[in-house]
Image: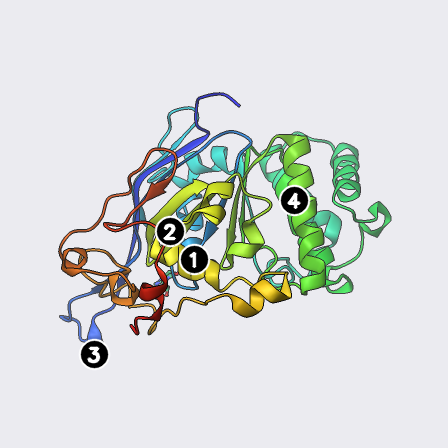
């Protein structure tokens, strides 16, 4: 690894304008802050896990990085270019270096194209001069690499299982030799028995090809083994960002502790005795986020100050955005919130 980040997000924001209530022409548009000022760095070859409950802005963050969401702020690529606000033509140049793998494997593949055509598409888009035989050779190599049978190149997506479809999606992402692959909940739609196979495949490819990965999941257990660092998101903001080992062993933010407490422990005795930190209520609307710390309305430790000032993300290698970080005591856990 070099010291130079592959990608550096600074105050990255995504705001959607929704039509005003009542749909009258003079109704003021409402603003939905899906991503509200996110900072992180990603080193070449690093895997960053991104977790948070549904609606916390994970997919929108991913889409912002490839120019598919209306973003402000900065996402500086290795060469110094800010990816935010690039024209579609200039974004094309970066799209071969940043690829995505989506959640729903079958829905994200064109049903009328053969597997060979699907995997070849990014290659023929970004490398127009390649001959047909060369394209076919590379597609077959890539199919082999992701554990698909190269002689199935003329089959259609519906002839494959969910796990195999996700392998097709991965092959398609990797065929242009990207530096970064953003996996948006790549295993959430798969059977639990298949999830580990796909995660292991991604980990293996990541290691062999020196790829950086942004691996999005709503569950902390999914990203534990694959991530170098983990970013915990809540209502469009970063709550905690730390090395995976530190984050799981010594979570500082009450939200991370709540998420972790819900992860099942394999040891039945520990599982029986553990305490699940309850999160009261629903995720607030990003149209009307709480003042100060966005988590305070569900936090067992919230004080007056939390409603007044938004906590900065601070702490060197183990970053936390909380005025009162640290492990929750047993008394705090029994407080009804
Ligand atoms: N195209 C869009 N237009 C309006 N609101 C959107 C759009 N995409 C996402 N949102 C809203 O942004 C918030 C974050 O969504 P999303 O990024 O999909 O969260 P996650 O991936 O963490 O579940 C949600 O409130 C969602 O309804
Ligand atoms: Mg999502």
Q: Give the Cα separation between the discs numbered 2 and 3.
A: 25 Å
Going 40% across and 55% down the picture, which residue do you hit?
256
Going 43% across and 23% down the picture, which residue do you hit?
4
- Label pair 1/4, CB-CB below 8 angstroms: no
Instruction: Give the label, 1 or 4, closer to the camera.
Output: 1
Place residue 192 in its image quadrant: bottom right
Is the distance from the Cβ of mark 2 to the nearest ligand 1 atom less than 8 Å? yes
Crowding around mark 3 (Cα neighbors within 10 Å: few <14, some 14 to 19, many 20+) is few
Q: Where's residue 234, x and y in %? A: 35, 57
Is the distance from the Cβ of mark 1 to the nearest ligand 1 atom less than 8 Å? yes
Going 59% across and 34% down the picture, which residue do you hit?
211
In which quadrant of the rendered image does the C terminus lie? bottom left
Place residue 60 in its image quadrant: bottom left
Q: Which residue is mark 1?
A: 52
Q: Which residue is mark 2?
A: 69
Give SS at disc 3: helix
Instruction: Give the label, 1 or 2, closer to the camera.
Output: 1
Q: Which residue is mark 4?
A: 202
Q: Earlier in the sequence, mark 3 or mark 4?
A: 3
Q: Earlier in the sequence, mark 2 or mark 4?
A: 2
Q: Give the Cα separation between the discs numbered 1 and 3.
A: 32 Å
Left or right position of 207 against 280: right
Q: Earlier in the sequence, mark 1 or mark 4?
A: 1
Q: Earlier in the sequence, mark 2 or mark 3?
A: 3
Q: Which residue is mark 3?
A: 22
Instruction: Give the label, 2 or 4, closer to the camera.
Output: 4
């Amino acid at each position: 690894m070099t010291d130079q980040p592959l990608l550096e997000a600074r105050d990255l924001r995504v705001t959607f304008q929704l039509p005003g209530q009542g749909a009258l022409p003079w109704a003021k548009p409402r603003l939905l802050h899906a991503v509200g000022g996110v900072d992180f760095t990603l080193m070449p070859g690093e895997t960053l896990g991104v977790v948070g409950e549904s609606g916390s802005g994970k997919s929108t963050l991913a889409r912002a990085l490839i120019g598919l969401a209306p973003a402000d702020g900065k996402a500086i690529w290795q060469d110094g270019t800010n990816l935010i606000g690039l024209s579609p033509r200039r974004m094309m140049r970066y799209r071969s270096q940043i690829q995505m793998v989506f959640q729903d494997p079958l829905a994200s593949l064109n049903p009328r194209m053969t597997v060979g055509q699907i995997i070849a598409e990014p290659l023929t888009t970004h490398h127009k001069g390649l001959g047909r035989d060369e394209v076919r050779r590379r597609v077959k190599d890539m199919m082999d690499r992701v554990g698909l049978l190269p002689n199935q190149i003329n089959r259609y997506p519906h002839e494959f299982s969910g796990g195999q479809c996700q392998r097709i999606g991965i092959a398609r992402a990797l065929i242009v030799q990207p530096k970064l692959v953003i996996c948006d909940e790549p295993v959430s739609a798969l059977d639990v028995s298949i999830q580990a196979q796909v995660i292991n495949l991604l980990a293996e490819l990541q290691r062999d090809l020196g790829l950086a990965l942004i691996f999005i999941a709503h569950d902390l257990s999914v990203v534990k083994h694959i991530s170098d660092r983990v970013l915990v998101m809540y209502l469009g903001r970063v709550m905690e960002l730390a090395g995976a080992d530190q984050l799981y062993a010594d979570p500082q933010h009450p939200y991370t502790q709540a998420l972790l407490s819900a992860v099942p422990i394999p040891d039945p005795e520990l599982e029986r005795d553990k305490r699940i930190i309850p999160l009261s209520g629903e995720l607030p609307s990003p149209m009307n986020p709480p003042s100060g710390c966005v988590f305070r309305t569900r936090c067992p430790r919230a004080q007056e100050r939390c409603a007044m000032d938004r906590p900065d993300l601070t702490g060197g290698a183990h970053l936390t955005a909380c005025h009162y970080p640290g492990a929750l005591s047993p008394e705090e856990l029994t407080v009804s919130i």
